[in-house]
Amino acid sequence: MPLSLRLAWRNLWRHQRRTWLTVAAMALCNTLLIFMIGLQAGSYLTMLNNNLAVFSGHLQVQHRDYHDQPKPRFSVANGVALAARLRQLPEVSGAAARGMGFALLSSDKRSKAMQVIGVEAEYEASVSSIPGTLREGQYLSADTPNGVLLGQRSANHLKANIGSEITLLGSGRDGSFAASVLTVVGIVDSGMEEFDRNTVFIRLSDFQDIFSYGDEVSHIALLSASIFEVANTQAAIDGLIADRETLRSLDWDVLMPGLKQAIQSDIASALFIYTVLIIVVVFSVLNNQLMAVLERRKEYGILLSLGVAHRRLIGLLFTETALLALLGLLVGIALGGALNEYFAIVGVQFAGMEEMGEKFNLPARIHPITHPLTLLAGPIIVFIGSVFAALYPAIKLRHLNPVSARAGL
Amino acid sequence: MSAKLPTTHLLALAWRNLWRNSERSVVMIGALAIAVAAMLFLIAMMRGLLNDMSQQNLRALPGDLQIHQPGYLDDPSIDYRMPWPSGDLLAELDGVGVARWSGRLSVGAMVASEREARGIQLIGYVPSREGQNSFNEWRLIDGDWPSDDSKGVVVGASLLEKLDTQLGKRIVLTSQGADGEIADIGARIIGVYRAEMAQLEERLVYMALPAMQSMLRSPDDIQQIAIFSRDPSRLLDVQSRFQQLLPSADIQRWDQLNSYLSAMLDNMDAIITVLIVVMFITLAFGLVNTLVMAIFERVKEIGLMLALGLKPTQIALMILAETLVLLLLGIAIGNAAAGLALLSLRDGIDLSAMAEGFAMIGAAPSLTPQFLWRDLWMCNGIVSVLGLACSLLPAWRAAHYSPIEALYRD
């Protein structure tokens, strides 16, 4: 071990209790940072996956103007054929065409205006988790002509059961009257209250007949292998639809701008807390090192008189601070990592989370993520901040005069 | 010999001790002040956001207290209706605790223009009772609000655009009538409003209550009684009075109406306490360190004081007083800084760049911090009490030095 490192190490332990207290402050701060960042990452990823996989998909292919003005006339021609071609792309893990309309639905007891979504029954499950939430009856298929799938809540509202007849009244794509009699074939529970209350599903082919869509669809929903590969997938899709000028692809960020912004504003408020925590810890380190410099005035005076350069003493101080910060970093990572691993298995539950879960479609427990980034980001900033904290003591040291310092002045 | 040390001397001693190593004290006070200021600021912002979410949640159908038939809130259907208040209920509503009240209808409906159809929430209210007082957050940009006998509807600007229609044109409203049959009516658009959140603007359509009652074939029936209390702090009393009068009705305060928000509101104090305590613990290590150092450098001096006859209790009190002065200075500066920051933001922070994200959590894109004295006392109280608690052990140890050993320690 080089001399300066050994000196710094020994200096550190001249006040064991003081050193341990400062290390503990850093370790606690690091543990908190690791845990909170891991928890945030975990909840964002769950939130993204759950929200996008329920209905919107990672990407959609739409008419160029549909997103800004969702009108029936801005539709995708030959939608089913296009969806089939998109499905062939290796980047696309699921694709399904849909029609979107509004209509008044009536059972023999109740009526309610709801969104009617026409789905490709055999492919819908590849882009949406809703088919998997079937509670009663069966999902739409070729064997269920004029079948309708209700959400749990809309079924309650309409007082409808499997086999009930539902009348649909609305207006078609061309402004004509759209009417049909449907039979309830199944009941799903998407877990999203509003959605469940206001949405019903029918087969795309029925939708096209009832709402006079011909071979048009409203959009094609697509999933890519993971949320991190959306850009790649979008490029592949854009290549395929390049020859159709009226179409464009939109990623989840455009489709659900609220999602990214909700995450961003949450990150902003978390960053505020982290910054304050880090500042408080850096102040502790600053005080620690300030004390060290002040109580060693005589010693520094002697060393300076003996011809040791200020530069060496400052180097020693920074080495000492870095060692201190390193201890805090290592203890913090060990504790934080362990805490994360524990809660990754057990899950974290907050008060009010069930209600929030309903709102954002989150599970009742969140599992923090341990990733080098979530593990290191906080502690490294604390480390850098701590080393910076030695700057002020170092400046004091720089101006130390050997004669007066030796006298303890 | 038993020396008496008056409190003023004790404080003077503590004050001077604090400035013997002024840099160390300033760093500690600085850390305290930053932590306290940041906590107060964050709490006010969190409260502001929650408050805003609760308000937004109520914008559609405001009211400090709302009376419904049981079941309505889960399933807002015309089946859950009640007659316009009369008798004892009317007397209580017109009583002293209530500033004003009104009855409303609110059902899901479909609106169709010549080109488009949309699902909306149709709200029937009594303009002469509520006027724009209830819905004054909506800015009317064209036309007029309805009068009591008006048959027209007021729609949001973005719904108007989606329906591809305009002011003065007719639209068709369809819903379920009280008799279970489909009820529809043609109505003229007589007004267009803008709301802070596009979500609401697209969904809420207003009309006069009588017109809506005749459309739904439920003359004289309403679904909701909204009550505005004269004194918000007595709301619980008012609620229990009405509950006694209507034992079977579903009577909710504004802060209970949304399960997510009421859970958040209930837990807010707990969340704030945890936040302050966590922040304090991070701070505590530095605080204890400062104290331990301050005592460590003064071992000889403390030994001398003990030898001169000062009681251990007085030594401990001196150190506690020193801690208290340190804490109070940090808290005072922190409070002042937070006060200034909040005062400069009292008109709200514009967050329109994140409008859709805020809309998703149900808040308007402008955030006004909400300062509560309770939060200030809680934050200051926790920091002072825990701070003094941290100093107990070092103070006790210092008080029990042996004078001889302390005097001769090097």
Image (cartoon, rainbow, N blue to C red):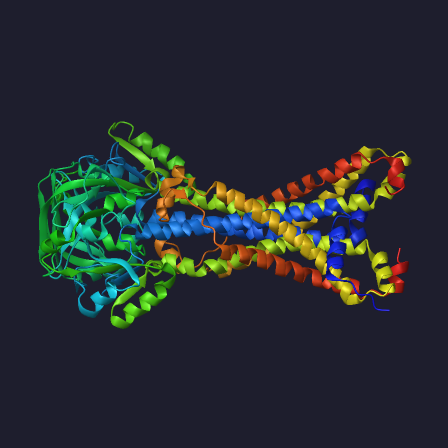
Q: Position of residue B197 (x, y in %)?
A: 31, 43
Give the answer, above or below, for where B403 lies relative to A87. Answer: below
Decide if residue A226 is in sight here: no
Q: Is residue A357 left or right of residue B15?
A: left
Name the image quarter holding the C terminus of chain A. Answer: top right
The quarter of the picture where residue B267 lies is: bottom left
Decide if residue A301 is in sight here: yes
Name the image quarter holding the N terminus of chain A. Answer: top right
Relative to the observer, which residue lies in front, B131 or A111? B131
Relative to the observer, which residue lies in front, A208 or A365? A365
Q: How many numbered dots are placed on residues in this image?
A: 0
Residue displayed at 81% across by 51% down: A14
Q: Position of residue A21 (x, y in %)?
A: 71, 54
The quarter of the picture where residue A228 lies is: top left
Q: Position of residue B163 (x, y in %)?
A: 18, 39
Q: Is residue A153 left or right of residue A302?
A: left
The quarter of the picture where residue B399 lies is: bottom right
Residue displayed at 26% across by 55% down: A196
Q: Position of residue B285 (x, y in %)?
A: 67, 54
Give the answer, above or below, for where B385 lies relative to A216. Answer: below
Give the answer, above or below, for where A242 lies relative to A145. Answer: above
Relative to the observer, which residue lies in front, B209 or B257? B209
